[in-house]
Amino acid sequence: MGFQLPKFIRIGGNTFKLQFNRVPDGSNRFGETDYANNVINIGSQNTPERIPSTLLHELIHAICTDRHIDMGENEVDNLANGLVAVLQDLDAWPWEIAWPGEKESYKEGASGY
Ligand SMILES: [Zn+2]
């Protein structure tokens, strides 16, 4: 199932820009949410299959921040993995992700967005 990512995602009162290949500190993190600039960065080390769960993880962080929910990294990770399992069981999991403006899904080695 293909799924086209939007350029922006609104979470509560904030609109976040989605960027790929832009985890700026050079760490091996799969993703990060930059609250100062309202940007969700998805790291280039994500395989295409991993992008949806990384995005889900970052969205949970952003929702927790917006709703003042105190959730640690472990809880965020477990909640994201639990949602992935449910969505996969429902056959509602976006196995392939297309970035905005790209006709084809992201493939490993592509320059990204
Ligand atoms: Zn996290």
Image (cartoon, rainbow, N blue to C red):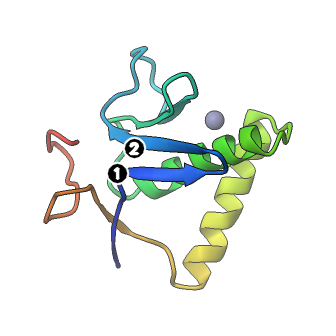
Which quadrant would residue 112 be assigned to in this image? Answer: top left
Residue linked to disc 1? 7
Which quadrant would residue 20 be assigned to in this image? Answer: top left
User: In x, y percent, where is residue 7?
Assistant: 34, 51
Label 1 Cα crowd, 10 Å radius (few <14 / some 14-19 / many 20+): few
- Left or right: where 56 falls relative to 100: right
Residue drawn at x 22%, y 42% is: 113
Which quadrant would residue 99 be assigned to in this image? Answer: bottom left
- Tell which residue pokes out farthest to the bottom in this image: 90
Residue linked to disc 2? 18
Instruction: Classify the position of ligand 1 by quadrant: top left, top right, bottom left or bottom right.
Output: top right
Q: Is residue 6 visible in this depiction of the protein?
A: yes
Residue drawn at x 14%, y 39% is: 111
For the residue marked with disc 2, what is the amino acid? Leu
User: In x, y percent, where is residue 31?
Assistant: 48, 35
For the residue marked with disc 1, what is the amino acid? Lys
Residue drawn at x 40%, y 26% is: 23
Which of these two is toward me, 32 or 63? 63
Which of these two is toward me, 44 or 20? 20
Q: Is residue 50 visible in this depiction of the protein?
A: no
Quick one: label 2 or label 1, which is nearer the N terminus?
Answer: 1
Q: Secondary structure at mark 1?
A: loop
- Left or right: where 57 falls relative to 93: right
- Tell which residue pokes out farthest to the front in this image: 13
User: In x, y percent, where is residue 88?
Assistant: 56, 76
